Amino acid sequence: MNIRNGCALVATLVAITVPLACSSDEPKKSGKKGGSDDPSSAAPAVTGAIADLTGFSCEPDKARKWQASGKLTNGSSKPRVYHLTVSVINPNNSEVYGEKSVEVQLAPGADREVTVEDIDKGHTKKGRCTPFVTVDEG
């Protein structure tokens, strides 16, 4: 057998055995300890909900502590758990100066003024606030 035929034989054997070695007839597991793939046992989905935040404002006070506020409104027919995260960033290079999150539970049709304090201290108006709102669905 010459080298060319030997290399072709090895390449063929590798091409056949690698996919077989990596496949399995066993059903996939959820990866959770004692978990299930049953969708009814899944964790609630998280959905973006920035439209539920109105009147958002954010700026540093005289002591250069950044504070944000706005109103969250649950326009759905179900209770919701909102997560409002506010980041103070450098608009020139996107460096995050500070970030803080709050959780707000709202009944259907309810709204609430929300304040996030002490997001960052020390950066002046050079920073920019960015709000992120998510809601647990389910």
Image: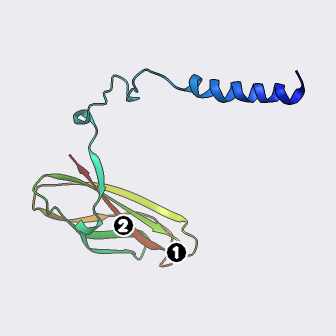
Distance (Cα) linking label 2 and label 1? 14 Å
Would you call the spot at circle 2 few (<14 residues within 10 Å), some (14-19), or many (20 or more)? many
Whether residue 27 is situated above or below residue 123 in the rendered picture: above
Q: Give the amino acid at mark 1.
A: Pro
Q: Quadrant of residue 44?
A: top left
Q: Residue furthest right?
A: 2
Mark 2 and mark 1 lie on one chain; the one further toward the N terminus is 1
**Quadrant in which the N terminus is drawn:** top right
* Mark 1, residue position: 91
Q: What residue is drawn where x is 43% and y is 20%?
A: 26
Q: Are marks 2 and 1 in contact (CB under 8 Å)?
A: no
Q: Residue furthest bottom?
A: 125
Q: Position of residue 12 (x, y in %)?
A: 71, 28
Q: Position of residue 126 (x, y in %)?
A: 51, 78
Q: Residue 24: which disc?
A: none
Q: Position of residue 123 (x, y in %)?
A: 51, 71
At numbered mark 1, what does the secondary structure look like: helix, strand or loop? Answer: loop
91 and 119: which one is in front? 91
Would you call the spot at circle 1 few (<14 residues within 10 Å), some (14-19), or many (20 or more)? few
Q: What residue is drawn where x is 9% and y is 62%?
A: 109
Q: Position of residue 131 (x, y in %)?
A: 36, 66
Which colouring convention does the figure follow?
rainbow
Q: What residue is drawn where x is 81% and y is 29%?
A: 7
Q: Give the amino acid at mark 2.
A: Pro
96 and 16: which one is in front? 16
Q: Is residue 44 left or right of residue 2?
A: left
Q: Is residue 33 left or right of residue 107?
A: right
Q: Quadrant of residue 62?
A: bottom left
Q: Residue 131: which disc?
A: 2
Q: Quadrant of residue 32?
A: top left
At numbered mark 2, what does the secondary structure look like: helix, strand or loop? Answer: strand
